[in-house]
Image: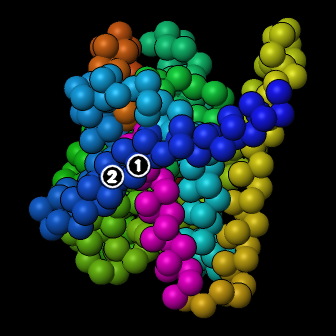
């Protein structure tokens, strides 16, 4: 028995190699595409492109090799995902909170909470969607797009098809926002005297989905707008960790209400490590070159996880999801523009 066990352990890395390599190749291709000007100008980052590539391959060639690749693909979309979220903390510092001021913090908190609560109410009461789909779309719309959806997935143990549906909503409406927000700025500044290049940047960062999309939309207005948008967005990203902790507590509360699986729920340790990494980064203990290298590694890790997620997503499952998730995403997009704009104007007026 001991000999058989040792042989099994020796072959375990080999079992994962094929799936990990396939996911990594797709991630590398997506990362390269994201650097092309024609692609980056659309706000299509490596994460978005990786899941698209994974879906394309997963629904064409992948089924022929699924038996040999599945172990590595599953490892990539679960364990590498957690590692990627932890490493994401090296992009943030607590000093960034001070840069946007108290008003930026309050705006982000109100926008996040109102968007997620609205998603829960509309998704469940109006559209009749399942809990996981609603929470995933709500997390992606209210925090940081695909990264928030990927971080939420292991907490609620959602199916890959539901994750892909949620990511589709933030890709579609976030891409639309890239073109709409710059067009809205002249109108908003004409209607409201308090709208400046900086305040429009805070509005952009507090309401748009993906970091890449925020950069593209802010850059289209002015460098000042872009800088303010990125700071506001990164502050919003920092709220991901406490959001995950609160969501995990809610999951445990629901499970303890009678589920036989309540004992199997795991605490999202990666959320705490994420906070710890951001704290370390705030102290600037590591050389800039090391932090930059870690950020590049994180890009690869997250893109690999996205590619793996795409490989396990079947178009048939997306079709079964129907149009309701997209309608929810549209409703939240409208709220982010209109309601988020009202929150920005109100808080800036009160705290100015």
Residue at 32%, 58% (x, y): give it: 28
Label 1: how many Cα within 10 Å (few below 14, some 14–19, many 20+): some
Residue pointed to by mark 2: 25
Q: Please state which of residues 146 and 238 is positioned toward the viewer in this rendering.
A: 146
Residue 327, compared with residue 329, is above or below; it is above
Q: Residue furthest front?
A: 3
Left or right of 158: which side holds 330? left
Residue 312: image location, x then y, percent: 42, 28
Indicate which disc residue 21 carries: 1
> Residue 279's spot in the image, x, y percent?
73, 73
Element type at mark 2: helix
CB of mark 1 within 8 Å of CB of mark 2? Answer: yes
Q: Is residue 195 magenta?
A: no
Query: For the magenta stretch, what is the residue range?
Result: 289-309
Residue 295 horizontal/vertical position (percent): 50, 71
Residue 298 sits inside the magenta stretch? yes
Q: Say left or right for 29 vs 269.
A: left
Can residue 165 be spotted in the picture? Answer: no
Q: Residues within 10 Å of mark 2 (few under 14, many from 20)?
A: some
Residue 129 seen = yes
Q: What is the quadrant of the C terminus in the image?
A: bottom right
Q: Quadrant of the N terminus?
A: top right
Image point 53% across, 43% down: which residue? 14
State the residue at coordinates (56%, 80%).
291
The one nearer the camera, 59 or 150, is 59
| Residue 303 in picture, x, y percent from top left | 41, 52
């Amino acid at each position: 028995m001991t000999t058989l066990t040792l042989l099994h352990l020796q072959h375990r890395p080999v079992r994962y190699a094929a799936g990990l390599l396939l996911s990594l190749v797709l991630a590398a291709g997506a990362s390269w595409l994201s650097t092309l000007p024609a692609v980056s100008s659309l706000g299509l980052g490596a994460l978005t492109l990786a899941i698209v590539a994974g879906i394309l391959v997963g629904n064409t060639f992948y089924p022929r090799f699924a038996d040999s690749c599945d172990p590595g693909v599953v490892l990539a979309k679960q364990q590498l995902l957690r590692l990627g979220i932890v490493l994401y903390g090296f992009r943030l510092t607590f000093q960034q909170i001070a840069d946007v001021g108290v008003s930026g913090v309050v705006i982000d908190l109100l926008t996040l909470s109102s968007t997620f609560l609205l998603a829960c109410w509309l998704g469940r009461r109006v559209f009749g969607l399942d809990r996981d789909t609603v929470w995933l779309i709500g997390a992606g719309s209210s925090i940081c797009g695909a990264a928030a959806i990927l971080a939420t997935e292991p907490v609620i143990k959602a199916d890959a098809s539901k994750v892909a549906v949620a990511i589709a909503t933030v890709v579609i409406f976030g891409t639309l926002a890239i073109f709409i927000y710059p067009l809205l700025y002249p109108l908003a500044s004409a209607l409201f005297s308090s709208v400046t290049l900086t305040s429009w940047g805070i509005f952009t960062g507090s309401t748009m989905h993906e970091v890449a999309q925020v950069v593209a939309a802010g850059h289209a207005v002015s460098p000042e707008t872009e800088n303010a948008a990125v700071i506001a967005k990164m502050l919003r990203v920092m709220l991901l960790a406490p959001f995950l902790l609160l969501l995990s507590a809610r999951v445990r509360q629901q499970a303890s209400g009678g589920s036989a699986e309540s004992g199997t729920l795991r605490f999202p340790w990666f959320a705490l490590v994420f906070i710890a990494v951001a704290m370390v980064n705030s102290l600037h203990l590591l050389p800039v070159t090391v932090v930059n290298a870690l950020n590049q590694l994180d890009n690869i890790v997250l893109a690999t996880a996205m590619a793996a997620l795409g490989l396990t997503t079947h178009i048939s499952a997306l079709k079964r999801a129907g149009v309701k998730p997209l309608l929810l995403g549209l409703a939240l997009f409208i709220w982010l523009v209109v309601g988020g704009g009202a929150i920005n104007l109100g808080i800036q007026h009160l705290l100015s």
